[in-house]
Amino acid sequence: MGKSSPSACIELKDGTHVAKVVLMPGDPLRAKYVAEHYLENCVLFNDVRNMYGYTGTYEGKEVSVMGSGMGMPSFTLYAYELFHFFGVEAIIRIGSAGGIGDDVHVRDLVIAMSASTNSTMATSYALPGIVAPTASYELFREAVKAAEEMNVHAKIGTVYTSDFFYHPDPEVNQKAKALGHLGVEMEAAGLYLTAMAAGKKALALFQISDHVFTGEALSAAERQDSFHEMMEVALKTAVRAEI
């Protein structure tokens, strides 16, 4: 019998807890892969709805990894509850994105400073004007430093977070490209908004799984089990964060 939980989606198993820093891929099987291949003494803390969450250690520091599902509604549900109900101080998204920039290629690492979006989620915060979903500088700085130390050539800039996987406007990706966006994905803006509102820290890292304009693409299996550079940069960022 697990501990009582304020959440319908996360229920801690007996004797488990969530670390202060959580890595969040969309795919729960990627969370399982990260836990089994990178974390020491990892323990499953959640499997409600098969959204696996694990806590273990990396380079001596406690880190959790948990799936989020696809899209801002699913991601922000888990992010909000982790921040508000389970004592999490920082979330690092590790996911895939479609490349749209001319100098972005399959398997490239993208570190997102900010995320434009077509979602109306930001309007709920009632700020006169437009909220700019932005990464936490401390996490961003540590990720850039980790990538440099690993000789990973990271692309740094803005991504476009879309509520649509199949957008009805066939020109939307060209428009995003023209404004300098590096890639298109479905979660970063939601994470940044949720963290900003909670006074917590957040960062989104991506490896490019396909390119919208060139047709380059990875298989589903390659997306699930590869992206080692992104995972290692995220883990090093997590252990160095002053949390």
Image (tube, grey):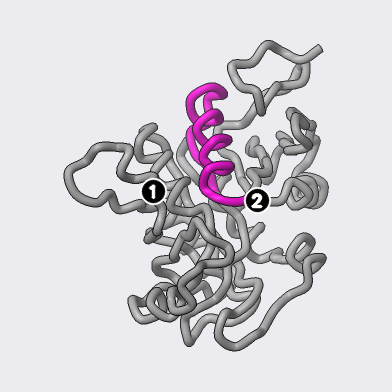
Q: Is residue 85 above or below residue 228?
A: above
Residue 123 % position (x, y) = 30, 43
Q: Residue drawn 67% across and 11% down?
A: 4
The residue closer to the viewer here, 126 or 211, is 126
| Residue stretch rendered in magenta on the structure | 70-92
Q: Residue drawn 63% across and 43% down?
A: 68
Which of label 2 and label 1 is nearer to you? 2
Q: Is residue 62 above or below residue 7?
A: below
Q: Viewed as shown, does residue 163 lie left or right of 37?
A: left
Q: Viewed as shown, does residue 135 lie left or right of 8?
A: left
Query: Quarter of the image containing the N terminus?
Result: top right
- Residue 210, picture quadrant: bottom right
- Residue type, label 1: Ser
The residue closer to the viewer here, 191 or 54, is 191
Q: Is residue 219 above or below residue 113?
A: below
Residue 233 % position (x, y) = 59, 59
Q: Are marks 2 and 1 in contact (CB under 8 Å)?
A: no
Secondary structure category for the residue under label 2: loop
Instruction: Give the labeled residue for mark 1.
Output: 136
Q: CA distance from mark 2 to mark 1?
A: 20 Å
Q: Earlier in the sequence, mark 2 or mark 1?
A: 2
Residue 23 % position (x, y) = 61, 45
Q: Is residue 19 above or below residue 106?
A: above
Instruction: Give the labeled residue for mark 2.
Output: 26
Q: Residue furthest front?
A: 168
Q: Residue drawn 78% across and 41% down?
A: 40
- Residue type, label 2: Gly
Query: Magenta: predominant secondary structure element?
Result: helix
Q: Residue drawn 71% across and 64% down?
A: 228
Q: Residues within 10 Å of mark 1 (few under 14, many from 20)?
A: some
Question: Residue 88 in magenta?
Answer: yes
Secondary structure category for the residue under label 1: loop
